[in-house]
Image: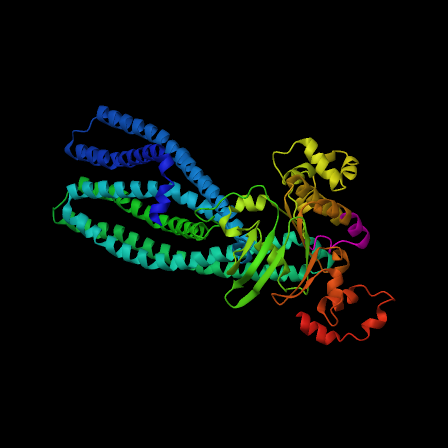
Amino acid sequence: MLKRFIAYYKPHKTMLALDMLASIIIALVGMVYPVLTRSMLGDFLDGTQTAEKIIYASAAVLALYIIRLFLRYFVQYYGHIIGVRMQAQMRRDLFAQIQKLPFSFYDGNETGKIMTRMTSDLFEISELAHHGPENLLVSVATFVCAFVYLWSLDWALTLIIFVCVPILIIVAAYFRKKMREAFTERRTSNAEINASLESSISGIRVTKAYTNSEKETEKFEKGNNAFVTACKKAYDAMGKFHAGTSFITDIFNVIILIAGGLFINAGRIGIEDYSAFFVSINLFISPINTLIGFMEQYQNGVTGFERFLEIMDQEPETDSPNAEELREVEGRIEFKNAEFSYDESAEVLHGVSLSVEKGQKLALVGPSGGGKTTMCHLIPRFYQLTGGDITVDGKSINSLTMDSLRKNIGIVQQDVFLFNGSIKENILYGRLDATDEEVIEAAKRANIHEWVETLEKGYDTQIGERGVKLSGGQKQRLSIARVFLKNPAILILDEATSALDNTTEILIQRSLDELCRGRTTIVVAHRLSTVRGADKIAVISDGRIAEEGTHDELMKLDGGIYQALYRLGTCSPENMDSLKDINIGELSEKAGF
């Protein structure tokens, strides 16, 4: 882990070296005062001190302090700049990694928790990156210089004081472990709060609609209280750490008072040396205190970096070594004994074999949870098959680059996601290099251009977060325009109109029919009346193909799942009598409801 952390210093090694040099000079300047104090006190005792010496010594100290003034500014400013730039690079790497991670990662990680890794965790790492080397180097340099100077005054008294250092290290190491565990728990709790906030704020309209603000408050308070409890543990450990280590450093003063007094009484050292010990002991203790205080920052930074690495070490989506580009796509798709499971405990697809030819429309119908949407997600490799294969134009999707595969697949889903921006920006997401004319043409084909023209700012109109200012039909048409602009050879419609009212669905369906023309299309639908004209219909139940054929062929299967579901979905007076003979219980069991 240390090696990976140090790697982020490489682009800033020159500035880091200057920062460390300035820090060492600052530490050395700090040694001047006790040396001059001892010298002046010795001159006073010898009777050789003069006003001229005092002025020269004071002027020298003042000059060094002015130099230290500028050096401290340099260290504070450029040291933090190094930390911020490292933080920016880590955030850049983390964002790039997040873009590469598969859907399975997001299935198990909430947005708020990921955002915590990107913000507060990286801030703590930045602080460690700046203060870590500086505190470590300055503290060690100051400690060594002070030790050497005190040794030169009296080695025995220095050793007596130094005996306390191992005790201090042992106490610090013990409480450091406790702090690490406590601060890790605190960060986890903080991530939980962020996740809860993100969920509650995103769903505020649902909360208000169902008047469940008290429930959301209860959920928030649960996480908030857990955070308070975790903080109590962290600060308890930190309090014990500081109290224990501060007590040990206080002992230094007691030792110098007793031992120094005894040494003077025995005539081993003089008054000037004893005074120098008192002045210099702060130089001896100060770096130790700095290192003790640094422990908390170190703990925060290391914990944050560990959480950073947790995401960086996740296995990203990767192409096979000899993956080829998918070009001149016709759109033939075939499932070959495809198997898939989200985890080892539950298999979703069981040996599915199915094909759709170029330009055909395949409809997937059946009960919820049967595996229809999963099949759609497997085609663009959002998830990896656990068995079997899927081919596009006879080529295994595993042998193709994911970018080229996904560029040739357009997806329109029930839950439309729009970015916070303008109408134009959201349509352009289909193809970022498209011209304004192409954007307008895509909007026209999606039957939304005329509405956009009525807006004051037209295509530059801001739609709000997730398109909150738009109706469901308008959102869906924007997503359709986006796919028109992308112009893929393969189209997947996953419950594209199921959330719309009948009138809006009819209008949207016209846009979808236009979109499907000339493309291989896979449609997932619960309203079976919308897929009557499909070239092939597959009934998916419990991860298997229960029935397959055209609408007319499936309707001829007496007692079939599709026939029964279709009649249930179209309860007109003409078929009400036939519905009397349907055993709902048997149908539900057979269909896997």
Between 355 and 315, the one nearer to me in the picture: 355
Is 504 magenta? The answer is yes
Query: Does the rendering let one see residue 11?
Result: yes
Which range is magenta? 494-508
Q: Image point 30% across, 29% down: which residue?
A: 64
Q: Tell me if 443 is positioned left or right of 173 in this view.
A: right
Residue at the image position 31 percent from the left and 28 percent from the top = 62
Q: Position of residue 127 (x, y in %)?
A: 42, 43
**Colouring rule applied to residues:** rainbow
Q: Position of residue 571 (x, y in %)?
A: 83, 66
Q: Could you tell whether 98 is left or right of 4 in the image?
A: right
346 vs 214, left or right, is left
**Magenta stretch encompasses residue 208:** no
In the rendered image of this protein, does residue 122 appear above or below residue 25?
below
* Residue 527 seen: no
Residue 240 spot, x, y in % from top left: 38, 58
* Image mark count: 0
Camera-side residue: 123 or 373? Answer: 373
Q: Position of residue 463 (x, y in %)?
A: 70, 41
Residue farthest toward the right in the current orientation of the protein: 573
Which of the image's four quarters has the C terminus?
A: bottom right
User: Which residue appears farthest toward the top when viewing the image?
Assistant: 52
In the image, what residue occupies the spot 79% across and 66% down? 567
Of residues 534 and 317, the one drawn nearer to the viewer in this rendering: 534
Q: Which residue is at the front of the view, 570 or 226?
A: 570
Q: Quadrant of residue 15?
A: top left
